[in-house]
Image: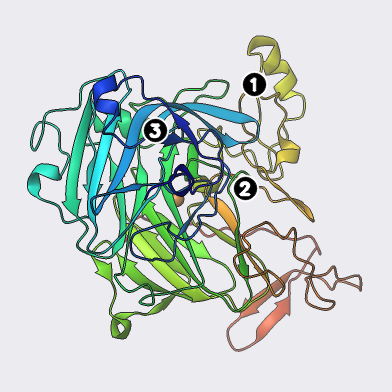
């Protein structure tokens, strides 16, 4: 028996009629479910079918299904969506079922799966099941394995999920436009036995990038490399949900990269093991510890750690430009340049001109009103001031008193006395020293001013 209650297991999910589907056809189609917010929805245990431990999609949700004669049926709707990237900025993207990325699809190894895909975009599309073993005709490559799904049409994909692991779905139709517009989703095939590969918390997100001019809403789809918004699940810091866990939890983080460049994902305060790749689980004897793992284009990684250290730990892409929002590009280095008054003079000719700070790039040195619907370049307030990062940056929040199954934000970490960096208030000795082999550091002759010595490499050989 399928009740509506079972079907709408995701809190906040609402049914919408798919106007594109004919009335005769609609009777045999699963209802299309959509969400209109970017909140993280904690999934409940599966209502039917084989049991699995559901994943938590950062700022996302998992798609409900219905059981039809032993087949798990899902209904994806490809459509234009409005996605809030962070409070203060909304993007007009394309996605699935109301959001970009689309809902996570969770199945169990051995499940027979039927996915209805309705196209409400203004152009044809298809869905490719990235990494899954499927019959060739279900692979979703427009022109090669199927004709494109024309606007208003619905296609059916049907296959058996044969291999447990971490996967993605995305169009293989006008990819440059459709992926630049945000069409993608996560797919998890759980092991047959839910006790295999079990963890306490299992987080998933996709990496995607957009090029949205400050003050506008739509991504430029022709951009090849110079994107200005780097996201986890189409959210930028501080809009990205935290990974809130209980101290001692075994935590899995799965990420997939659908941008045009690689992202070295770096976690503070803990080592982790890479336990899963695109090809499945890494045998336990072949795993090695890391604190950064590089996610190549089109790749998926699952990492696991014991969250033993209490605190607020950064999890971010280590390319510093990827923790910046719009406007972090094509700006000259003005460190050390006295440009007082220059901005005002240029402003008479070029309204809105901005100079970078002469003491670095921090927000204090920047003077420019932001256009509407634009995020500051560096943003996010922490308990001690600006975090000075946007983009691909979030926090692993480890707390001793976080309850099992509680994914809510515990707030900022309170550092126990004596465990936090502090200001030295004693005397500071002369800072200039010159090092000579065999003699150690000697006080430099002359003034006590700090002297900057720059030794430039003579050539570029070997670079
Ligand atoms: Cu990156």
The verdict on label 1 being within 8 Å of ligand 1 is no
The reply, left or right, for residue 113 in relation to residue 88 is left
One can see residue 297 in this view: no
Up/down of 169 relative to 458, above or below:
above
Mark 3 in CB contact with mark 2 (< 8 angstroms): no
Residue at the far top in the pictured view: 349
Q: Nearer the viewer, residue 374 or 330?
A: 374
Label 1: element kind:
loop
The verdict on label 2 being within 8 Å of ligand 1 is no
- Which image quadrant is residue 178 in? top left
Q: Nearer the viewer, residue 251 or 20?
A: 20
Q: Nearer the viewer, residue 143 or 330?
A: 143
x, y percentage for residue 292?
45, 67
Q: Nearer the viewer, mark 2 or mark 1?
A: 1
Label 3: element kind:
strand
- The mark that comes first in sequence, 2 or 1, is 1
Q: Badge 2 is on which residue? A: 389
Residue at the far right in the pictured view: 426
Mark 2 in CB contact with mark 1 (< 8 angstroms): no
Compute the Cα span from label 3 to label 2: 26 Å
The reply, left or right, for residue 93 in relation to residue 23 is right
x, y percentage for residue 425?
91, 70
x, y percentage for residue 186?
37, 50
Compute the Cα span from label 2 to label 1: 20 Å
- The mark that comes first in sequence, 3 or 1, is 3
Instruction: Look at 38% across and 48% down and name the residue there.
Output: 2
């Amino acid at each position: 028996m399928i009740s509506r209650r079972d079907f709408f297991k995701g809190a906040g999910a609402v049914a919408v009629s798919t106007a594109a589907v004919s009335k005769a056809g609609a009777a045999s189609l699963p209802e299309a479910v959509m969400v209109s917010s970017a909140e993280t929805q904690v999934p409940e245990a599966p209502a039917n079918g084989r049991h699995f431990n559901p994943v938590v999609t950062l700022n996302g949700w998992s798609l409900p299904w219905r059981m039809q004669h032993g087949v798990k049926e899902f209904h994806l709707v490809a459509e234009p969506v409005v996605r809030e990237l962070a409070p203060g900025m909304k993007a007009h993207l394309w996605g699935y079922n109301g959001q970009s990325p689309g809902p996570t699809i969770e199945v169990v190894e051995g499940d027979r799966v039927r996915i209805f895909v309705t196209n409400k975009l203004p152009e044809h599309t298809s869905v490719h099941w990235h990494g899954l073993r499927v019959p060739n005709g279900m692979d979703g490559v427009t022109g090669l394995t199927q004709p494109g799904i024309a606007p208003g049409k619905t296609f059916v994909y049907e296959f058996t999920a044969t291999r447990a692991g971490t996967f993605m779905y995305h169009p293989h139709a006008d990819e440059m436009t459709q992926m630049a517009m945000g069409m993608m989703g996560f797919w998890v095939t759980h092991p047959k036995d839910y006790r295999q590969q079990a963890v306490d918390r299992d987080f998933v997100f996709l990496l995607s990038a957009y090029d949205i001019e400050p003050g506008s809403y739509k991504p430029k789809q022709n951009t090849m490399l110079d994107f200005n918004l780097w996201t986890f699940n189409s959210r930028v810091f501080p809009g990205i949900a935290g990974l809130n866990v209980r101290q001692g939890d075994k935590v899995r983080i799965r990420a997939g990269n659908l941008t045009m460049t690689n992202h070295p994902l770096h976690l503070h305060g803990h080592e982790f093991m890479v336990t899963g790749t695109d090809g499945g689980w890494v045998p336990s004897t072949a795993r090695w510890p890391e604190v950064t793992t590089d996610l190549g284009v089109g790749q998926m990684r699952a990492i696991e750690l014991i969250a033993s250290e209490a605190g607020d730990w950064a999890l971010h892409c280590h390319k510093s430009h990827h923790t910046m929002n719009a406007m972090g590009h094509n700006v000259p280095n003005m460190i050390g340049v006295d440009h007082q008054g220059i901005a005002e003079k240029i402003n008479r000719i070029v309204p809105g001109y901005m100079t970078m700070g002469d003491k670095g790039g921090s927000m204090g040195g920047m003077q420019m009103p932001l256009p509407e619907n634009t995020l500051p370049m560096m943003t996010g307030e922490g308990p001690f001031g600006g975090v000075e990062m946007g983009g691909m940056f979030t926090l692993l929040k480890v707390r001793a008193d976080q309850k099992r199954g509680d994914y809510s934000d515990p707030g900022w970490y309170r550092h126990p006395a004596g465990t936090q960096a502090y200001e030295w208030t004693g005397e500071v000795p002369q800072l200039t020293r010159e090092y000579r082999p065999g003699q150690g550091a000697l006080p430099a002759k002359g003034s006590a001013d700090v002297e900057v010595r720059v030794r430039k490499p003579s050539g570029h050989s070997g670079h």
